[in-house]
Amino acid sequence: MRWINTRPSKGARLALSLAPFMVVLIAYLIGSAARLAENANDRLLPSFAGFADAINRMAFVPDVRSGDYLLWVDTAASLTRLYSGIGIATLIALAIGMLIGMLPYMRALLAPFVSAISMVPPLALLPILFIIVGLGETSKIALIAIGVTPIMIRDLALTATALPREQIIKAETLGGSSWQIALRVVLPQILPRLIDTLRLQIGPAWLFLIAAEAISSEAGLGYRIFLVRRYLAMDVIFPYVAWITLLAVGTDVLLDRLRVTVFPWSELEKNA
């Protein structure tokens, strides 16, 4: 039996998926115990009790100065920026991606420009955005949109271009206009890919958000991490990083469930 043909059982798959997390957890526990044994006030690798105290302080105890529950205020601020930027990027990418994928003239006009723009490092544009639109919410949302839109456009355009030409010809034979072909033939088939592309851009979108919040913000998960780093508050930084990861994973899972629910046939194609 070749290894390439073997498949783990459900129990083995679950154990294998948990194994890397357990290795990281055990390694941290060993490292933390060793450092705390040498110095009980060590701040680099806090104990789990220290994490619990910090989480309680940030999430369930109102801040002395503002009266806010900082974790939830930061989460609301970051998610509002993140989803606003991703929403704008999705609408733009869907419209331009379909145009490039369907219309040869638009492909000749926009494809080289989008390809060039997608190579520009988005973080290099952050100072320009701050100068043009200021330090407020607009610059942060714009950075997310600028960062993920070109990649999404290129992916959707390639998906639309790769659709079987026979489908377009059949629709034309039945008298379908370009608008009808776009809505009834192309759009339903690229929407599942749009969701998958969006899932792939969640990580980069968080990166752009945290970078923008770190430079100029009054609330947000990235802002809080960079604020407390000056105090070496690892008991706050680690839980915030874990919380960001959990939010990103949750968004990814929800998008995948959305794709399977709305477009069940896309799952059959993947398993074919």
Image (cartoon, rainbow, N blue to C red):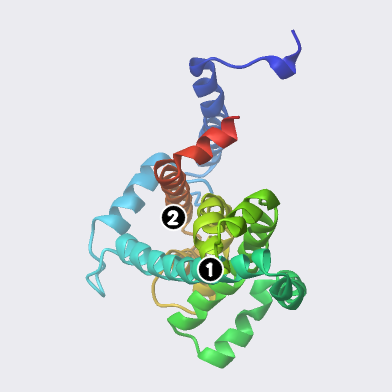
Q: Amino acid at mark 1?
A: Trp
Q: Residue at x 31, y 64 (%)?
A: 70
Q: Is residue 164 visible?
A: no
Where residue 271 appears, x then y in whole percent?
Answer: 58, 30
Which mark is drawn over residue 104? none
Question: Please, which residue is most extreme toward the top here?
Answer: 1
Element type where label 1 sits in the image: helix
Residue kind at label 2, given as amino acid type: Tyr
Q: Earlier in the sequence, mark 1 or mark 2?
A: 1
Q: Is residue 97 left or right of residue 224?
A: right
Instruction: Give the spatial CA distance, label 1 vs label 2.
Output: 47 Å
Q: Which residue is located at x 62 percent, y 84 percent?
A: 127
Nearer the viewer's eye, disc 1 or disc 2? 1
Which picture quadrant has residue 5? top right
Vertical relation: 37 (above or below) 224: above
Q: Position of residue 173 (x, y in %)?
A: 61, 56
- Where the C terminus falls, by quadrant? top right
In depth, the one of 216 and 169 nearer the eye is 169
Quadrant in the picture for residue 145: bottom right
Where does the image place residue 211, in percent across and percent down from the top left?
56, 70
**Image marks 1 and 2: residues in contact by CB distance under 8 Å:** no
Q: Is residue 11 above or below residue 205?
A: above
Expressed as whole percent of the image width and height from the top left, the position of residue 125 reads 65, 80
Give the labeled residue for mark 1: 179
Residue under label 2: 240
Identity of the residue drawn at 66% across and 51% down: 163
Judge whether 13 appears above or below 126 on screen.
above
